[in-house]
Image (cartoon, helix red, strand yellow):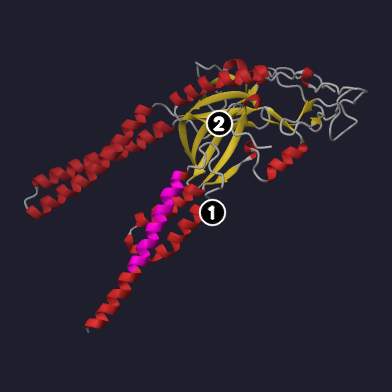
């Protein structure tokens, strides 16, 4: 089912003030001042602006004998196959994700456990957390060494807990940061133990020499 | 079936916003805006097939920073000069040394601001990049914030988007073949 073709737009909204401007006024090399907000604008419109996609219909084509049918709607003609599982889907079940087309099942399974990288909106950096938890208390100084009993194990926990967790989407896990953080965490722990031993033994020696 | 891995390439330019540091990364079919705050990252994607316009808006942020750095740097330099002159004309040794030490501290601070002023001038005019998609309208990108990287960013991105949009014409013959009877 198709819907009437959309015509090319005759104006665009200024990104700053929203005032309607003529698309011809915008150029990549020359700057144009918006009459509304006086913002100097330059840029480019892309083919999708000039020829907007036809609005997709929610109605699917009815399948005739011999047509491939949708896995979820056997009465509908299949228009695509899922790029993940290969099931045939109709226009109703087609879930476009960038350049890929998925079926509803693959999309919902990918939403749950972050299996689809295109759907990840937030990530916690365990490696960065390990590094900072290891470095910052040491940078603050040895005056806060009693707190190393908390920050040291916390660093070690972050390092091991996040070892297999996914890291940054574009940068990856960056495990070297976690390794350095773990090392600093062990140093904190060692300093705390050494300081505790020093305090204990100095007290016992003082008592022995009294 | 395993999820496909996406390879990202870092784009020039970075930005600083209320939500943290921002960088742009380029994938095969989309642009990824990453806002990072030390231990967490937030992502926003702009798929090439949806992008309808890219606009650079020249801003006056550089001018504002130039004024701030100029006042602090110039004022600090004047103050340091005054303290130095006061120290040179002081009769007491202790007062002279105190004023010179103060002049050194204030002068160092002023030098930092003057260096920042020089760097700000050197980096070029500031701007804000806006991206328009057919689905979400305008969005102000947190990076790049300087005009030259922004122009490079546009020059690099526009051919990629045009190539994707040229390829993504809705094809009627993508339907699966009929099942064999």
Tell me the magenta residue range. Answer: A176-195
Residue A189 quadrant: bottom left
Per the model, the C-alpha gap separating discs 1 and 2 is 26 Å
Q: Secondary structure at mark 1?
A: helix
Look at the image and say whether residue A200 sits in the magenta stretch. Answer: no
Residue at the disc numbered 2: B7
Q: Is residue B69 left or right of residue A26?
A: left
What is the x, y in percent for residue A174?
A: 48, 42
Q: Is residue A86 left or right of residue A125?
A: right
Query: In which quadrant of the rendered image does the C terminus of chain A lie?
Result: bottom left
The chain letter for the residue carrying disc 2 is B
Q: Secondary structure at mark 2?
A: loop
Residue at the disc numbered 1: A161
**Residue at coordinates 54% horizontally, 21% vertically from top-left?**
A43
Q: Crowding near pointer 2: few (<14 within 10 Å), some, many (20+)?
A: few
Which residue is farthest bottom? Answer: A210
Report whether mark 1 lies on the same chain as mark 2: no
Q: Crowding near pointer 1: few (<14 within 10 Å), some, many (20+)?
A: few
**Which of the pair B163/A112 is nearer the observer?**
A112
**Which of the pair A149/A21 is nearer the observer?**
A149
């Amino acid at each position: 089912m198709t819907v009437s073709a959309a015509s090319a737009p005759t104006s665009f909204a200024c990104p700053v003030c929203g005032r309607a401007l003529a698309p011809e006024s915008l150029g990549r090399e020359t700057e144009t001042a918006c009459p509304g907000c006086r913002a100097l604008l330059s840029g480019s419109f892309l083919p999708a602006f000039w020829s907007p996609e036809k609005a997709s219909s929610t109605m699917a084509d009815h399948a005739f004998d011999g047509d491939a049918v949708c896995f979820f709607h056997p009465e509908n003609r299949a228009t695509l196959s899922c790029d993940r599982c290969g099931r045939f889907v109709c226009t109703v079940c087609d879930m476009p994700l960038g350049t890929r087309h998925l079926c509803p099942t693959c999309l919902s399974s990918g939403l749950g456990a972050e299996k689809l990288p295109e759907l990840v909106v937030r990530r916690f950096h365990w490696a960065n957390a390990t590094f900072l938890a290891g470095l910052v208390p040491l940078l603050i100084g040895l005056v806060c060494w009693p707190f190393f009993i908390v920050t040291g194990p916390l660093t070690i926990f972050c390092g091991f807990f996040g070892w297999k967790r996914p890291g940054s989407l574009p940068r990856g896990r960056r495990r070297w940061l976690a390794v350095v953080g773990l090392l600093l965490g062990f140093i904190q722990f060692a300093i705390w133990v050494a300081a505790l031993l020093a305090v204990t033994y100095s007290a016992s020696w003082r008592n022995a020499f009294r | 079936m395993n999820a496909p891995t996406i390879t990202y390439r870092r784009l020039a330019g970075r930005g600083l916003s209320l939500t943290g540091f921002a960088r742009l990364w380029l994938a095969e079919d989309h642009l990824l805006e990453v806002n990072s705050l030390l231990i967490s990252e937030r992502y926003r994607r702009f798929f090439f097939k949806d992008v309808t316009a890219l606009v650079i808006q020249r801003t006056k942020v550089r001018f504002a920073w130039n004024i701030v750095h100029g006042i602090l740097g110039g004022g600090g330099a004047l103050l340091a000069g005054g303290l130095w002159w006061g120290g040179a004309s002081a009769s007491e040794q202790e007062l002279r040394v105190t004023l010179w030490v103060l002049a050194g501290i204030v002068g160092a601070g002023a030098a930092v601001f003057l260096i920042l002023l020089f760097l700000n001038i050197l980096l070029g005019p500031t701007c804000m990049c806006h991206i328009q998609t057919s689905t979400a309208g305008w969005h102000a990108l947190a990076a790049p914030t300087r005009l030259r990287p922004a122009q490079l960013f546009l020059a690099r991105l526009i051919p990629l988007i045009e190539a994707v949009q040229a390829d993504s014409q809705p094809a009627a013959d993508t339907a699966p073949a009929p099942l064999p009877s």
